Image (spheres, coloured by chain):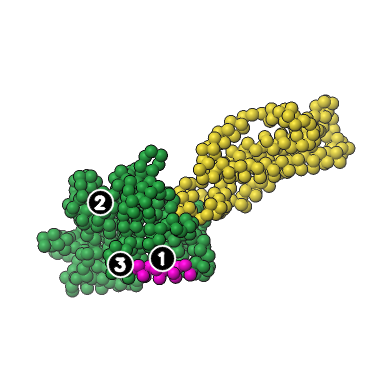
Chain colours: A yellow, B green
Amino acid sequence: MNLFQYVSENINKILGLFVEHFFLFLFSLIITTIIGVTLSIIVTDEGMEKIGKTILSITGAAQAVPSIAVIALVFIYVGIGKFPAIISLIVYSLVPVIFNATSGILSVPKGVIEAGKGMGLTKNQILWKLKIPIAVPVIMGGIRSAATIIIGTAVIASVIGGGGLGDLIFTGLKLNRLDALVVGAASSAVLAIIVDLILAYAEKIITPKGLKIER
Amino acid sequence: MSSDTNKKENKEAKNTEGQVKEKAKEYTIELKDVTKRFGDDIAVDHLSLGIEKGTLTMLIGPSGCGKTTTMKMINRLISLDEGEIKLNGTSVYDIDPVQLRRTIGYVIQEIGLFPHFTVFDNIATVPRLLHWDENKIKKRVEELLDMVTLDFSYAYRYPLQLSGGERQRVGLARALGADPEVLLMDEPFGAIDPINRLKLHDSFLEIQEEIKKTIVFVTHDINEAIKLGDKIAIIRDGKLVQHADSTEILYNPADQFVESLLGQDRSLKALTLKKAKDFISSEDVLTVGKDASQDKVLKQLQEKNQIIAFVLDKNEKLVGRYWLEKTGKKGKVEINYDEKPIMTEQNNSLNESLSTMFSSGEQLLPVVNRRGKFLGIIRLSYIFDEFNK
């Protein structure tokens, strides 16, 4: 086995799969974030606290469901191809986004919200000026887990036609080609690390300064 | 539009003030037969209460008696089921709740400072909601920080960098941000340790003397109610038991419930009604400048036949104390210096000042205001004289 030889001979194919994997990830993460955060905002609205708490326990438990089960279910009900793969990625990664965003918003101190309301902030102002900025570190934590989960799960989703680096890994498995397997696994690991570093930096930038102060 | 509204309100406020003199029953806040139910429980039961302009009214009662609910109905954080609440003659239900709340200052026990806002931005919250000009906001924040005796350097700190007492001061400054006529306070000093609470009480009373807001203050601490309140409204099971000024409550409790609330030591509590400033004197008090030499002070003390001299800086802030001590042999005296003299604040109640005297063994204490400015002294003998009268 010569890794370098394998890489240099298949560089275009590898890069193509890497890019495909990346876009699969990016698209799923964006949709998941939008759906997840919106849903969390709705269930944490005033008067919805009970639903929010229920959602919290459901998503808490749902984190224990293996990704392969979700992919299998989507395969059964939706079929094969890119679209079902993306659906399974979104469904699976919604769990940490909703869990974190909901718990983040619910844990904004009650006194802060009451003071805001008592001083005459509108509902929207309470959401965008108080709840969201204060919950940002927790929400971002959920998005970061979702990102890592999507990159890892996308490998498995290639069995239902998702494409990406999973193709390389499963080809390696089927043909007993260790070089393909290692390159595929290492590439997705590198992608996961880079993405997490970028998101960590983003988190640092958008977290309000007053929340970062050590007591 | 905000400044117009403000002007109009000020005018209206002045009108109300004028009318108060003519007919005594013009209230800033008026509750009429207010009732609130939570499910089958009745939280507030046909409660009527009139609050006059510029008074500090304490709502007190056991927990669950409906005092907080009553207060929160004024700014419509809780809606009422029956009755009417009027603010300067207008039903609060005729005003948009968001606009209404912007004209009423609000302080809660948790303070609820916005952790991601600086002190400046916290205090500027309501002025910004009202679209004040930034220069005007900056001036107002400066003014308010000065009022609550925080240096302007605090403006760019975050709440997490403040102590509990400092947060409470910022909370008060924030509530006063847009200079509301009415202030609602829900156990604002409840979470503060006893020593700082006393200090905050004193500063708060001094500030209220300056600003004369109409304040509704919820507490469950009878000592706090007696010390701070102009008027006390005692609530039990959602009903108003007694509403009168503190002296009246202490000397003429309406029923056994009020008596039990006041406790066994009613006559001692009456001491709380007198403040240190009622006994201030500047007779026979020697004060010296910060740069006066020890020898000079010693000479002055001996000339005036005194044993204590207070050291003031150029802002008349009390910064130290000289005192003479006989060193036994040959009647020789020695001069000593205290960098942190024991003192009492002008709004300390008499029992607090007495307690400071007893615990320090001093027979006279310097009296200062919340900024540390020296106002005079209080002597144990003055207090006894007062009681012998």
Q: Which mark is residue B146?
A: 1
* Residue B234 vertical placement versus B131 (above, below): above
Left/right of residue A107 with respect to residue B65 in the rendered view: right
Q: Residues within 10 Å of mark 1 (few under 14, many from 20)?
A: some
Q: Nearer the viewer, residue B221 or A40?
A: A40
Q: Nearer the viewer, residue B351 or B132?
A: B132
Of the two numbered discs 2 and 1 in the rendering, the one whose residue sits closer to the viewer: 2
Q: Are marks 3 and 2 on the same chain?
A: yes
Q: Amino acid at mark 3?
A: Val
- Residue B154, given in percent of the width and then of the height, sits at 46, 61
Q: Amino acid at mark 2?
A: Gln
**Which residue is depicted at the point 42% across and 67% down?**
B9
Question: Does the rendering let one see residue A62?
Answer: yes
Q: Quadrant of residue A43?
A: top right
- Residue B352, given in percent of the width and then of the height, sits at 24, 55
Mark sitting earlier along the chain (2/1)? 1
Q: Residues within 10 Å of mark 3 (few under 14, many from 20)?
A: some
Spatial separation of the CA atoms under disc 3 and disc 2: 22 Å
The magenta stretch is B4-17
* Residue B233 vertical placement versus A183 (above, below): below
Q: Are marks 2 and 1 on the same chain?
A: yes
- Residue A34, given in percent of the width and then of the height, sits at 66, 45
Q: Nearer the viewer, residue A191 or B313?
A: A191
Q: Are marks 3 and 1 on the same chain?
A: yes
> Which chain does the residue under circle 2 lie in?
B
Question: In this figure, which residue is indicated by the disc labeled 3?
Answer: B20
Of the two numbered discs 3 and 2 in the rendering, the one whose residue sits closer to the viewer: 3
Q: Quadrant of residue A59?
A: top right
